Amino acid sequence: GENVEQHPSTLSVQEGDSAVIKCTYSDSASNYFPWYKQELGKGPQLIIDIRSNVGEKKDQRIAVTLNKTAKHFSLHITETQPEDSAVYFCAASWGNSNYQLIWGAGTKLIIKP
Amino acid sequence: NAGVTQTPKFRVLKTGQSMTLLCAQDMNHEYMYWYRQDPGMGLRLIHYSVGEGTTAKGEVPDGYNVSRLKKQNFLLGLESAAPSQTSVYFCASKGQGYNEQFFGPGTRLTVL
């Protein structure tokens, strides 16, 4: 079955700097890759996603890149702000199913003032 | 719209006790999911439903049962709780033809 690995588990960056979180997946049939943000005490919330027919997608300060050959995708956050502090999860659709996701273990992002 | 709501928010059980977690959504979504979240392990799918009256097993279904008698509700049952079921449980829903899953606020369950 699908397996998603996420690195690093914790990332600490200075406010204003960029942050990059990386994920690798195992099932070449996966075709949908979302990123969710989880703030303390809340459920995860979708922040950006990408389909396998697109190499990059951007939304203001956040972007996601996908390398299908290497089976990895990354979340990029530029000009980090205190409110970016949270746990970020990547996920991949399981096989040809776009309604089941396999999740990475999460990255705790800490923005230092 | 309330979105996805979960009841209760917190619960402490003794080993062997049973309980039901309730998830409700008011977005008319077809798909509903139950996940558990443990430190360092991300989200793991317990059971899911693709429509009213249907349920299916996810990655970690053992020790849990579910029912979806009404489209807006998805119930997760623990028949005989074990300490290994101590976790935070999240419910999510998704509309047909859409990708985004909407999550509830979670239920923190402790089994002593």
Image: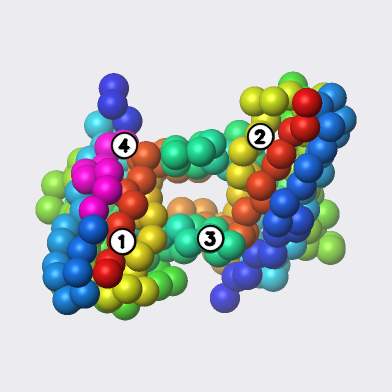
At a point 45% along the width and 58% down the height, the residue shown is B37
Residue A8 percent coordinates (x, y): 76, 56
Q: Point out which mark residue B4 bears.
A: 4
- Amino acid carrying mark 1 in the image: Thr
Frontmost of labels 4 and 3 is 3
Residue that mark 1 sits on: B110
Q: Are marks 1 and 3 on the same chain?
A: yes
- For the residues labelled 1 and 3, the Cα–Cα distance comes to 14 Å
**Residue A56 shows up from this direction:** no
Label 3 near label 4: C-beta < 8 Å? no
Check if mark 2 and mark 4 are on a common chain: no
Q: Chain of mark 2?
A: A
Residue farthest front in this picture: B112
Kindly indicate whether the residue at mark 4 contacts the one at mark 1 (C-beta within 8 angstroms): no
> Identity of the amino acid at label 2?
Ser
Both marks 1 and 4 on one chain? yes
Q: Residue at x 17, y 76 (%)?
A: B16
Q: Position of residue A23 (x, y in %)?
A: 73, 57
User: Any magenta on residue B10?
Assistant: yes
| Element carrying mark 2 | loop
Q: Are marks 1 and 2 on the same chain?
A: no
Give the amino acid at mark 3: Pro
Specify whether B22 is left or right of B104: left
- Please report, as a chain letter, where disc 4 is located: B
The C terminus of chain A, quarter of image: top right
Q: Disc 3 and disc 2: Cα gap in Å?
A: 17 Å
Which residues make up the magenta segment?
Answer: B4-11
Q: Chain of mark 1?
A: B
In front: label 1 or label 3: 1
Same chain check for tags 3 and 2 = no
